[in-house]
Image: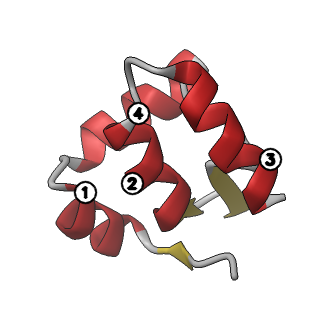
Amino acid sequence: MLLFVSKRQATECLNMSGSTLKRYRRSGEWIEGLHWLRINSRCIRYNLELLKDWLHNREDPVAHGRAIAIDR
């Protein structure tokens, strides 16, 4: 089940600042529609489980790729 959460919830659960979340979005490190969604111009939601996996497997893109395949 996909669980998309608010910026506040993501910062708390991932122990990251809002500016760090924004940096990963803008850098292309996180993929729109997969790691995060733009609800409107002021509302972003984050795929919490996939971002937790990304943090855990940052150095192993193949493992994260498997999580992406399962998530879809």
- Residue at the spot x=41%, y=33% of the render? 57
Q: CA distance from mark 4 to mark 1?
A: 14 Å
Residue 68 left/right relative to 49: right
Quarter of the image that includes the C terminus = bottom right
Name the front one of labels 3 and 2: 3
| Residue 8 visible | yes
Residue under pointer 4:
57
Quarter of the image that includes the N terminus = bottom right
The crowding category of the residue bearing disc 4, from other C-alpha atoms within 10 Å (few below 14, some 14 to 19, many at least 20), is some
Disc 1 marks a residue whose amino acid type is Leu
Q: Secondary structure at mark 2?
A: helix
Disc 3 marks a residue whose amino acid type is Ala
Residue under pointer 2:
52
Label pair 4/1, CB-CB below 8 angstroms: no
Say the numbered circle drawn on residue 69. 3
Q: Position of residue 10 (x, y in %)?
A: 34, 64
Name the front one of labels 1 and 2: 2
Q: Position of residue 23 (x, y in %)?
A: 39, 27
Name the front one of labels 4 and 1: 4
Among the two numbered marks 3 and 4 on one chain, the one whose residue lies closer to the N terminus: 4
Q: Nearer the viewer, residue 71 or 22?
A: 71
Residue under pointer 1:
14
Disc 4 marks a residue whose amino acid type is Asn
